[in-house]
Amino acid sequence: MNDQTLTPEERAANLKGMGCARKRVEDVRFTQGKGNYVDDIKLDGMLFGDFVRSPYAHARVVTVNKEAALAVPGVVAVLTAEDLAPLGLHWMPTLAGDKQMVLADGKVLFQGQEVAYVVAEDRYIAADAVELVEVEYEELPVITDPFEALKSDVVLREDLEGQTEGAHGPRKHHNHIFTWEQGDKDATEAILAEADVVAEEMVYYHRTHPCPLETCGCVASMDKVTGKLTLYGTFQAPHAIRTVVSLISGLAEHNIRVISPDIGGGFGNKVGAYAGYVCSVVASIVTGKPVKWVEDRMENLMSTAFARDYWMQGKIAATKDGKITGLWCHTTADHGGFDACADPTKFPAGFMNICTGSYDIPTAYLAVDGVYTNKAPGGVAYRCSFRVTEAAYFIERMIEVLAIKLNMDAAELRRINFIKADQFPYQSALGWEYDSGDYHTAWEKALKAVNYEGLRSEQAQRIEDFKAGKTRKLLGIGLTHFTEIVGAGPVKNCDILGLGMFDSCEIRIHPTGSAIARLGTISQGQGHATTFAQIIATEIGLPADDITLEEGDTDTAPYGLGTYGSRSTPVAGAATAMAARKIRAKAQMIAAYLLEVHDNDVEWDVDRFAVKGAPERFKTMKEIAFAAYNQAIPGLEPGLEAVSYYDPPNMTYPFGAYICVMEIDVDTGEWEVRKFYALDDCGTRINPMIIDGQVHGGVTEALAIAMGQEIAYDEMGNVKTGTLMDFFLPTAWETPNYITDFTVTPSPHHPIGAKGVGESPNVGGVPAFSNAVHDAFRPFGLVQSHMPHDHWRIWKIANGLGMHG
Amino acid sequence: MIPAGFEYHRPGDIASAIGILQEHGDEARVIAGGHSLIPMMKLRMTDMSHLVDLQAIEELKGIEIESDIVTLGAMVTQHELITHDGLASAIPLIREAALQIADPQVRYVGTVGGNVANGDPGNDMPGLMQCLNATFELSGPDGNRSVAAREFYEAAYFTAREEEEILTRISIPKPGAGIGQAYEKQKRKIGDYATAAAAVMVGNGTASVAMTNLADTPIWSEDASNALAGGDVEGCVAAMLDAIDPVADNRGPVEFKKHVAAVMLRRAIDRAQNRAG
Ligand SMILES: Cc1cc2nc3c(=O)[nH]c(=O)nc-3n(C[C@H](O)[C@H](O)[C@H](O)COP(=O)(O)OP(=O)(O)OC[C@H]3O[C@@H](n4cnc5c(N)ncnc54)[C@H](O)[C@@H]3O)c2cc1C
């Protein structure tokens, strides 16, 4: 063999396996504009769909007159709820156990709601015809405030009138969806009553939107000859979509093929099912032609799933020297007109009960009330695992608020309350078992890296200079230590619409020693084709460059629940390692046969099995692959492939320490990030370059959210931030430099110890930025101010503190 | 995000362009760089049956620097305003302000004529032109006329230009030696219109002060300019605060905008004074 002379280290390096900063194989096509996105799909005779949307946030739909639109040459059909009703498709189930109108059935509940669906020969004709559909509305009182909704006589969901029981238990009011309680209420309240110190605050995490660069869309193509429906779409969970389409439409599941092509970012926005999908499928079935629907930017921001909108009332109790004794939280969750959150069924507020964070808090209580308002539905996990961002923001703000109350340094307060390394696995007061962690080590490393003491003295000097009139700029030091809960999840407690949240990988080794692997997940920019090949490379000793990765075609890929909630590496990545290990187990038998020794007399050596004690006698994986197909081996089937369905025993708990140093101009509210340090511990690191890329992207989204990005409504329920002029998406100019760092605390239950990282930076970044703003003003008396911290809101803080003379 | 249908015209000279405008009346509109007009059409806030593209009209192009006057063709792009060396030394304020407009992609095609003719109070060039005391040359069916930038703006999207007139050139008196100039703009991000912006010229006992996006037109204030000419910075700021009339929007409430207006103005004055001879 030509590689006999190479050392094991050299052979391992040639594999480009785990730990290698391998360049992203996807980028060859993406950087050349050769990606294949939904809108690139062009089929013969394809028609285009476009929506008539409600200009009102709450109104009765009195009549819909299609005549003028239908008269336009090239218009094929105009669908309304009346047309869908006979098929039972004018409403659809949501992922949260509610139902949602596909097309307005008598009324509309948010601005931008779908009222009619125009199908035409091209998208220009469709857009013109949309203007010609005459809809008569009768305006109804609008409720945009969830607290008001719970008091109002106005019934938003008339279809639910009289239903006192919802999908998640009793409904207390006609605009109430559910109450979800975790932890020990009585014990927590007793602790609050007796505590030395209690800090109380309302922490609002405003409504925002994932805003992927590519908006949502699909092409539905019904082949009337074969009876087979092919549905291309921007789906983060193609297999789940197939099952849902089958359940909703009555088409047999084998007659549905769902394909997620290249996806230009998802961030949770592309998890749910949208009216556009249902209408396109119906239109294709009716016309027998392919139908494409792609939303524009405004439609995306106005109508497809938003994120956050949590009002979190918190109380945190501590001893006078800062040991936290209890945490209480009541959240009012604004879900909009329909409950279309994408959470595991048993968790109507997602994993909000991770809100004890990185701290050893013995007693805690959480209650969440879901509420209907006249806003768009959604509540998806925008680059996070089911409300983990809300939870992390809440606890990281409460820690700061408590530090103020105790007059204590916030870094020190965290230090004395962290769960200690020897406490893992750690049972949290709100019901989770944290798998592993070493928070103190990460924290000290982070503080040292930024010279925390030095920053604090600089800040003290700055405050003096400010008071002396020498500067108008303040310095904020934003601290965060977050703990995530990702990798949903164990089928025993995690399902979506009854579909267990395992995931899968199938690997086929070709005779010449290259391979193809298919997974139940789907990359939207995470680089799965790069990293999953690296896992396989290390596990079975074939070069990553010789392994093709495929996802997203339900006819070929094994069933899985898709990509969101940082679940791909924790779940499908585990399945990948397990499938690879099955292959290696068979390879061992083949190698032993070829080397004429017992199975147990060979041992694995990077890319080969060698006879124990005689390393010069070996069979490489390439040789084994060839033999697997071409040599009759007694007792073994030919071939070398395996599939694994992985049901994780637990979630994984990545964590990190983020520190933001920010300069703030008190006169204009302008800010500048001087330094951003992100230490992530995601367990085993598969590709450090991809981790860095994920952190860069996620922190940039966090910057956007904390510093300006929002979906804002006026009192009439009009969306005020429906274009990218007002919806803050940072450009390269606004994006600071990031310093990334890491510690490695592998997950004890994951086959390769990996925990997932894609969402950590969003979870940890938001409180780091927000805490920096708060910290700058802390010496002047600020306790809490709501995000987003755009110029005028920062100015308002300064103004409220009397800093403008 | 798809505009309604329209017919596209591409005349080769000003006279034919005016002819097309006359023929179609208020159904027609000229298009320059399209970076204000096309977004409006995509949002279906503007619906035009005829678009008259000015790109092929040579007479509308070019920058001329003479001894005491600078002339900009209406179709000069914002990018050219930045890269033209002669212009940068003749009136550095133009380059400084143009760099604050949008982003490079927009500036490659967006024109100075479109920016001043548009009438959007958010545009940066109108306030700048008022500060510089520019004159706009218009050609129409009845011939040519000039309108001072300070007289041009009537209300948001309403200007002294008649519907069948085309803005052809902008003439700007060259500021004398010793005049300090500065442009200050606060915006939320690259590509954003101003929360508040100030254009200031000061020196030799003269001053000119204009502000952007703080009323439904740009605001050039004679009182503020006079105060500054007399060295009274606070008087200048007070006069300007009197003249502006901002409205609340996503950038913030009125109180904030007034505060920021004063800050931008003071900063621009400070820098202009430092640059004055
Ligand atoms: C993302 C984005 C950000 C922006 N940010 C800024 C900013 O920060 N500051 C700023 O000032 N601008 C900004 N703009 C606007 C940009 O500068 C435009 O290019 C400019 O406002 C219009 O110039 P135009 O050549 O594109 O004109 P067009 O869009 O073609 O025309 C605008 C209007 O002027 C009329 N018009 C054009 N030329 C003439 C003429 N010669 N005679 C008569 N009428 C004419 C047109 O009929 C139309 O009504 C931004 C635009 C975008 C898309």
Image: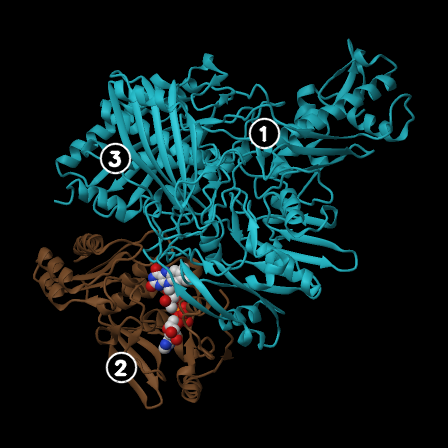
Chain colours: A cyan, B brown
Q: Is mark 3 within 8 Å of ligand 1?
A: no
Q: Answer left or right for A752 relative to A227.
A: left
Task: Give how far across and how far down residue B92 sits, in percent.
Answer: 28, 61
Q: In whole angstroms, how far apart are the C-alphas of marks 3 and 2?
A: 53 Å
Residue A189: quadrant of the picture? top left
Q: Which numbered tag is attached to residue A776?
A: 3
Q: Residues within 10 Å of mark 1 (few under 14, many from 20)?
A: many
Badge 1 element: helix
Q: Answer left or right for A87 relative to A172.
A: right
Q: Which numbered tag is attached to residue A245?
A: none
Closer to the camera: disc 3 or disc 2? 3
Q: In whole angstroms, how far apart are the C-alphas of marks 3 and 1?
A: 38 Å
Q: In whole angstroms, how far apart are the C-alphas of marks 2 and 1?
A: 70 Å
A414 above or below B155?
above
Q: Nearer the viewer, residue A196 or A138?
A: A138
The chain letter under disc 3 is: A
